[in-house]
Amino acid sequence: MLALGLSLGAAFPATAAEPWAPEQTKAKQALVLDGETGAILFEKDADQPFRPASLAKLMTMEVVFEALETKKLALDQNFRVSDHAWRTGGAPSGTSTMFAKLKSDVPLEALIRGTIVQAANDAAIVIAEGMAGSEEAFAGLMNERARQLGLTGSTFVNPTGLPAEGQKVTARDLVALARHIEEHHPDLYRIYAEPQFEWNKITQRNRNPLLQEGLGATGMGTGYTEASGYSIVGVTEKEGHTTFVVLGGLPSIADRQADARRMIEWADGAFRRETLFQPGQTVGAAAVYGGLVPSVAMVAREPIRAFVPQAKPEEASARIVYDGPIQAPVAAGQKIGHLDILIGRQVSVSYDLFAARAVEQGTFAGRALDAAQELAFGWIRAL
């Protein structure tokens, strides 16, 4: 494994330091991600599991959205409110509810809005029972979808997020889930920004506090359990840039709202977005073993962008990583390495690198010389 490093900070002079740093957050778990590039701007124990509470409903909605996309469900389809759904998540439960009447038939579209806008437990249970027959069976669909999306740190036990043994999520998984929903279900995602929803002649405001902050918030939800504290998934859009923020383990509602706002404002102002390379532009060169030429240029298929800290540009760096030397023959477009963009010691984002041209296998004499040089000098690289 070879790595070639370079500093990015020297090219971008420092500006005034921002007054708040994300390390000051009271959250036990945190992750801030740029939606366009997937660059991680900040993370704190992002793989440490915590109880999701109502944030589990993000996966409930993903299962529903996917079923709608594949025509397994229809928005005008009616689901019956069972006694279990009414008692566990409805008016008698004392939890978040859309006040669906016992044994009434509710259209799926209304249940979706109840689940998203009001974090309604009765709506989530009615959907689960209507789709899978029971909460337990629906949880199986949630976990199956989680594995399909690569959410390896999360396990779902019910569609509501109500306390249950074994139910857990991570900040990294929640960011990935939120990003997937925002990108792949844009029409349904817009419901997350609706300010209120009325059902059974009762109007309730959206429970996402960020929608009232003037931050360009477009979603998504909040959660609370006594064991894990207060949590939030926030999505904002500003000047065409989407930012995802997940915070978990906060001690109070006030801390949740304050830290979420500060984290978003920090992400908006703490970095300059710099384009380092255009698609097809040479990023570096990889050594080739046994080829007609000793090296091959590496290029990316997408613009390579870096987030450079305004206050400490010297913390931004990049490194090219590949298993080398590359064995000839090399095909044009063959993936041969990747470029890591780092903020401090943390990899913010990685870009795949590909061979810019083909490299044919060299002559027997040339390959013999390469072999001799590898025997003579290869051991030095291992030291």
Image (spheres, grey):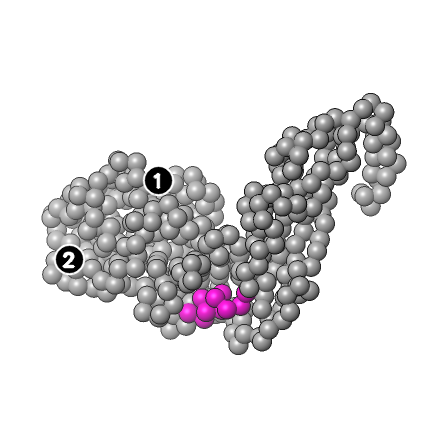
Q: Residues within 10 Å of mark 1 (few under 14, many from 20)?
A: some
Magenta segment main secondary structure: helix
Q: In this picture, is 185 found above or below 243?
A: above
Disc 2 + disc 1, Cβ < 8 Å: no
Measure the alpha-carbon separation of dots 2 and 1.
29 Å
Residue named by callout 1: 140
Using residue 188 as the reference point, say whether residue 353 is left or right of it: right
Residue named by callout 2: 199
Q: Which residue is at 39% across, 39% downward?
A: 144
Please name whichever residue, 105 or 198, is drawn nearer the observer in this view of the structure. Answer: 198
Q: Position of residue 328 (x, y in %)?
A: 72, 29
Magenta stretch? 261-271
Residue 338 showing in the rendered view: no
Residue furthest out toward the top: 364
Q: Which residue is at 27% across, 55% downward?
A: 191
- The amino acid sitting under disc 2 is Trp
Using residue 106 as the reference point, say whether residue 121 is left or right of it: right
- The amino acid sitting under disc 1 is Gly
Q: Position of residue 38 (x, y in %)?
A: 50, 52
Residue 326 showing in the rendered view: yes
Q: Quadrant of residue 146?
A: top left
Q: Secondary structure at mark 1?
A: helix
Residue 82, numbered label = none
